[in-house]
Image (cartoon, rainbow, N blue to C red):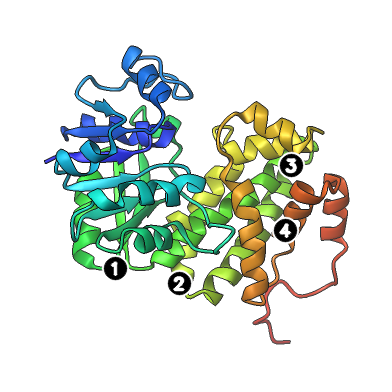
Amino acid sequence: MSISILGAGTWGTALSILLANKGREVILWSKLENEIKALEENRGFIKNLPGAVLPDSVKLTTDAEYACKTSEPELIVFAVASPFVRSTAQLVSGYIRDKQIIVNVAKGIEESTLDTLLDIIKEEIPQADAAVLSGPSHAEEVSRLIPTTVVVAAHSRSTAEYLQDAFMTDRFRVYTSNDIIGVELGGSLKNVIALAAGMSDGLGFGDNTKAALMTRGLAEINRLGIAMGAKPETLSGLSGIGDLFVTCTSHHSRNWNAGNLIGKGRSVEEALKEVNQVVEGVYCAKAALKLAHKYYVEMPIVEQVNKILFENKPVDEAVNELFMREKRPEHNLINW
């Protein structure tokens, strides 16, 4: 039996390479004919994955029924960008058998519903056994089999351990968890903080500033995550602080790159056009702020990022406002 990967962008392609090199039969699907055609024509020069080679054994298709049903996949990987998870789930739902294991590897929150991506998959494909894989895992590095560690969260231990076995190699270590909401929120919210980190670097600020953004950003992620039922240990783990660190500091990060361009004076539209890939943090920012209001949680960095993105607030003014907030202790648990 095969593994089908839905989404032939950088992350879906990187996982195809990882699994094919493990000896698994892989089917890589995209709705976009030009995306599949580009991979078919040149497996050794993949757009946005320098140095990566897509093995000849990976089958490429635009046929959703074949990918999800005819090929009888034992596992389906959702690797489409977050804005397209619902439409893809609706497209393939009729082809999914009962108790089919699906693992989502995208990161984001749907703005209109405030659903996590796994919520969307479970709503549109209720017959599936859905799980999530996340962590500090740039596709550019995974595609070249550079050592990487992630976490998979599922409703049952057996599904989590099955996915652990399916993905784990001597260069891709997988841990298990039952904290689905924690893994999803950590992977989604860090993208908003990474936009801020990029803006800081674009303004020419230093390591002190970025360390402050990451630390206080993690505090915001923790506040919202715990309010929504996540475990603090998860948010301090791979899908929380681990993913936050790599996304805020690496030039591979689309979110950092977009933020960096905005910090240098580009408009949001210009920055997104120049990055020319889906910048998940832009899609997640409004949802994160709405969740903060829903759960009565303070998220001042997320609030300022929203004002920069959607209200044309100058970045330096946002920085000043953050620094001049009301004085307070670092932790509410401090008792003098």
198 and 328: which is toward the camera: 198
Q: CA distance from mark 3 to mark 2?
A: 29 Å
Q: CA distance from mark 1 to mark 2?
A: 15 Å
15 and 276: which is toward the camera: 276
Look at label 4 and name its amino acid: Ile
Residue under label 2? 231
Image quarter where the C terminus lies is bottom right
Whether residue 146 is visible, yes or no, is no
SS category of the residue bearing label 3: helix
SS category of the residue bearing label 2: loop
Q: First in sequence: mark 1 or mark 2?
A: 1
Look at label 2 and name its amino acid: Lys
Q: First in sequence: mark 1 or mark 3?
A: 1
Whether residue 154 is visible, yes or no, is yes
**In front: mark 1 or mark 2?**
1
What residue is shown at x 72% (from left), y 58% (from top)?
301
Residue under label 1? 155
Q: First in sequence: mark 1 or mark 4?
A: 1
Q: CA distance from mark 4 to mark 2?
A: 22 Å
What residue is shown at x 52% (from left), y 74% (from top)?
228
Q: First in sequence: mark 3 or mark 2?
A: 3
Q: Position of residue 99 (x, y in %)?
A: 19, 60
SS category of the residue bearing label 4: helix
**In front: mark 1 or mark 4?**
1
Q: For mark 3, does the 10 Å Cα neighbourhood hold few (<14), some (14 to 19), or many (20 or more) residues?
A: many
Quarter assignment of residue 323? bottom right
Residue under label 4? 301
Q: First in sequence: mark 4 or mark 2?
A: 2
Q: Position of residue 291 (x, y in %)?
A: 61, 68
Image quarter where the N terminus lies is top left
Look at label 1 and name its amino acid: His
Residue 199's label in the rendered image is 3
